[in-house]
């Protein structure tokens, strides 16, 4: 884990904007987007349309919520014989 900040341009509602996130968050967002059958731009646009605060923070929270949603499934899968 490097924590290196990467700035990327995305298109939201037809306008280009840049977002700065740690490389690990970009990787996780790409994985989430693929899992939902979305492009990264489409995922970011969806988060943008529902957020009430900072977009970078909203994207980090999406990654956290996705991870938290996966944890109980992993725990229950390992608990069964």
Image (cartoon, rainbow, N blue to C red):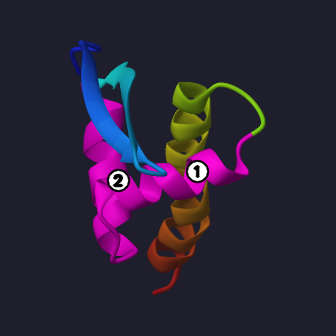
Task: Find residue 5 and report its horizontal and vertical position in percent.
Answer: 28, 13
Q: Residues within 10 Å of mark 2 (few under 14, many from 20)?
A: some
Q: Furthest residue to the front?
A: 14
Q: Nearer the viewer, residue 17 or 40?
A: 17
Give the structural element (helix, strand or loop) at label 1.
helix
Question: Dot 1: few (<14), some (14–19), or many (≥20) neighbours within 10 Å?
Answer: some
- Identity of the residue drawn at 33% across and 21% down: 22
Residue for point 31% across, 54% down: 40
The residue singled out by tag 2 in the image is 41
**Residue 34, horizontal then vertical, whole percent:** 28, 68
Q: Which residue is mark 1?
A: 47
* Residue 72 percent coordinates (x, y): 61, 66
Q: Is residue 51 above or below residue 7?
A: below
Q: Is residue 66 visible?
A: no
**Which one is in front, 47 or 22?**
47
Q: Quadrant of the N terminus?
A: top left
Which quadrant does the C terminus fall into? bottom left
Q: Is residue 48 left or right of residue 13?
A: right
Residue 3 showing in the rendered view: yes
Mark 1 or mark 2: name the one nearer the start of the chain: 2
Question: Residue shown at 27%/20% (left/top)?
Answer: 7
Q: Which residues are magenta?
A: 23-51
State yes or no: residue 3 in magenta.
no
């Amino acid at each position: 884990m490097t924590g290196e900040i990467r700035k990327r341009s995305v298109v939201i509602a037809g306008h280009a904007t840049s977002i700065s996130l740690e490389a690990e968050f970009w990787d996780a967002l790409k994985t989430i987007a693929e899992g939902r059958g979305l492009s990264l731009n489409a995922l970011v646009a969806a988060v943008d349309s529902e957020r009430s605060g900072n977009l970078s923070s909203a994207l980090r929270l999406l990654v956290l919520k996705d991870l938290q949603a996966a944890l109980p499934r992993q725990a229950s899968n390992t608990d069964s014989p």
